[in-house]
Amino acid sequence: MQSNAEKTFADGVEGVDDGEDEPRLKYVRLGSSCADLLSRAAASCMQVEDKMIALGTQQGGVHLLDYNGNEIRRFDSHKAAVNDLSFDAKSEFIASCSDDGSVAVHSLFSDETTRLQYSRPIKTVALDPNYSSRKDRQVACAGLAGQLVLNSRGWLGPKDIVLHKGEGPIQRLRWSGSLIAWANDKGIKVYDTAVHHRIGFIERPRVQPPGDHTSTCSLFWESDTLLYIGWGSRVLVARIVHEDDGRGGKAVSDDPWKVLGGPAKAVALGSPSRYVEIVADFGTDYIVAGVAPFGHDLAILAYVPAESAEGPGGAPPPDSGALAARPELRIVSWDNQDIASDALSLHGFEHYAATDYSLAAFHPMVCRGRAPASRAAGAGSASSGNSASSAPGRFARQPTKWWSDGLEPLYYVVSPKDIVLGRPRDGEDRVAWMLEKKRFEEALRLLESGEAARETTREKVAQAYLEHLFNTSQFERAASLCPRLLQGNAAAWERWVYMFARARQLPALAPHIPVEEPRLRSTAYEVVLTSFLPSVENHAGFLSLVRSWPSSGLYNPEQVCGKALARLGKYGGSPALEEAVAELYKIQGKYEEALEVLLGLGKEDVFDFIEQHGLLHLVHAHVVRLMQADERRALGLLVDCWEAVPPKGVVAALRRAEGKA
């Protein structure tokens, strides 16, 4: 369940829609050292890696934190704002760049440091994922000079290689595997360092003015296969395709990931072994401040412009008096179908523009296998020109829990003075929400699936579900659900025996009460049995329980029998109740008393009872009633036991009965 910090922040989270769709994320404000840090400095960028996060500030500091915001280490490498950060794949090195033109690479486990200096502000940096294991120690950086520079170590020291220049400032750079992607005013290019060749170009979405530098591009690699792009009000997903693609030829349109085309154009350059294709492309009614995968869906940090005229970066003009809306973290499908959306009350959001926000995501690569069947069925050529909006509902929703335990994704929403962590809701969170919405059966199914395993959670579901059924007088339904809800919890069973007793509904619960695993205290079973006595209609059920429940150790048969006899003596009873009394006498070993009751009922099985329990010596006292019950069997019994019951005595008894008649 949520921690105290999460509960506190939850008051500042608001769902955008009023529907009944289950939320996908829970939120906590990053505190500890981070809260103190942001009281003195302003966050400018963040990167997330396995077990740690790196936070850059406007004051030039780089701070390493754990996931809870506790500071682990600090580097003061820059004299101006830190613009970007990058870890290597093993999280052994961290690179940072700054407006002062500097690039710094620090080892996290030694004092090794590399510093580079350039004449213009450096806006973005990326370490070779294999930086820690390669001797050339490559690092790529770019910025306002409009050059993409690859720095590496050689025999004669470090050297710079310009991979690209001449198309204006480069605002974003990301490296995965052997692929480097970067964004400038023209669009996005992808370079393969393994073959030293650019393999693709994606035009900048035309909705943005060519000279607009206020709306930044966000890039996120998932492995080196999928590149997620957010730019202005558009979202794109590009796939890196091998020329062979494992099928002996160029990728064909039935590929499950080649699903959607759109107005953005991807161009393969030259004849590379790999090329880029657009598999999703759609426009939005908000500014995309960040994008990352959410399993088979997308997590988008959305900045919703104020209704008044907008200024640079999606912010209201200074003299408009309009306050900015809260940023939203949205979960959408690849065809832009809304799945979930939360508006976040970050400190100072009223005064921020879109460029003040960023999304730092940690998304461990999960085993995707093939895409969902509905995606594969809707696959089509990326060059078909069909926009995402023309295919509503094409994608089926993925399971609510799609990640592996211990590998949940993390989504940090970063603003200058506040950072909020969004993470998927676990089974306990989901159950709590379902209970709040009175979706009890769904909560129970989730428990039974094993996703929510805490015993306290099961107890809460049982309490809420059964109380709801009690309040709506659905006692039979409540009773039938008790085995699923209470399972082996003896204390819970006893508590609900009491609740059913208060409602005078124990006869409904009785068939479902366990007699082993767990076994309850004897008083619980006695309360259940005696609840059948007042109503004649329940006497058959009373008899059934006495016969079916274990005959020793479960309850005190003498007490139950005494209450049944009291009921018979005061109000009379029924044949079923009298037969139950006979059964209780049997359990106590009082066979003579049981025989009296059975003879009074005229039950034919009394003969078997006499033989089974060796009661032939009592036959002479009951000759007449035995003859009335079954004359043929009575005569046979008398013949068999003529020594114990002399014929003269039998004749005399019959004559006396005849005389009385």
Image (cartoon, rainbow, N blue to C red):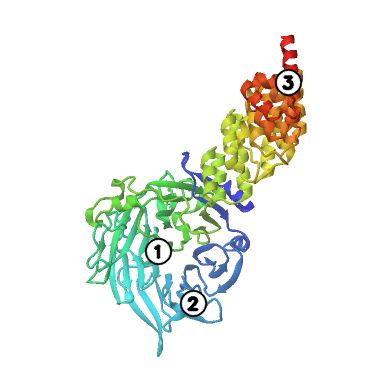
Q: Is residue 357 left or right of residue 195?
A: right
Coordinates of residue 61 in the picture (x, y in percent): 55, 70
Comes first in the chain, label 3 or label 2: 2
How packed mark 3 is, by other alpha carbons closer than 10 Å (few <14, some 14-19, many 20 or more), is some
Would you place residue 21 above or below residue 91 in this image? above
- Separation of residues labelled 3 and 1 (CA atoms): 99 Å
157 lies above or below 450? below
Q: Is residue 295 left or right of residue 546?
A: left
Can I make out residue 560 in this image? Answer: no
- Res. 372 visible in picture: yes
Task: Name the residue nearer the viewer: 567 or 122.
Answer: 567
**Crowdedness near tag 1: few (<14), some (14–19) or many (≥20) residues, C-alpha within 10 Å:** some
- The answer to whether 38 appears left or right of 374 in the picture is right
Residue situated in front as seen by the camera: 596 or 222: 596
The C terminus lies in which quarter of the figure?
top right
Q: Residues within 10 Å of mark 2 (few under 14, many from 20)?
A: many
Say whether residue 159 is left or right of residue 65. Answer: left
Indicate the secondary structure of the residue bearing disc 2: strand
Residue type for callout 3: Val
**Percent x, y of residue 309:** 40, 46
**Mark 2 or 1: the one toward you:** 1
Q: Which residue is mark 2?
A: 105
Q: Is residue 213 above or below residue 303?
A: below
Distance Cα–Cα, label 3 vs label 2: 114 Å
Q: In the rendered image, which residue does mark 1 sit on?
A: 222
- Residue at 45 percent across and 80 percent down: it is 133
- Residue type (three-letter) at the residue carrying disc 2: Val
The residues tagged by marks 2 and 1 sit, at their Cα atoms, a distance apart of 23 Å
Residue at left offset 57%, top offset 48%: 10
- Residue 573: where, in percent of width, then height? 70, 20
Q: Position of residue 59 (x, y in %)?
A: 54, 68
Which numbered dot is residue 650? 3
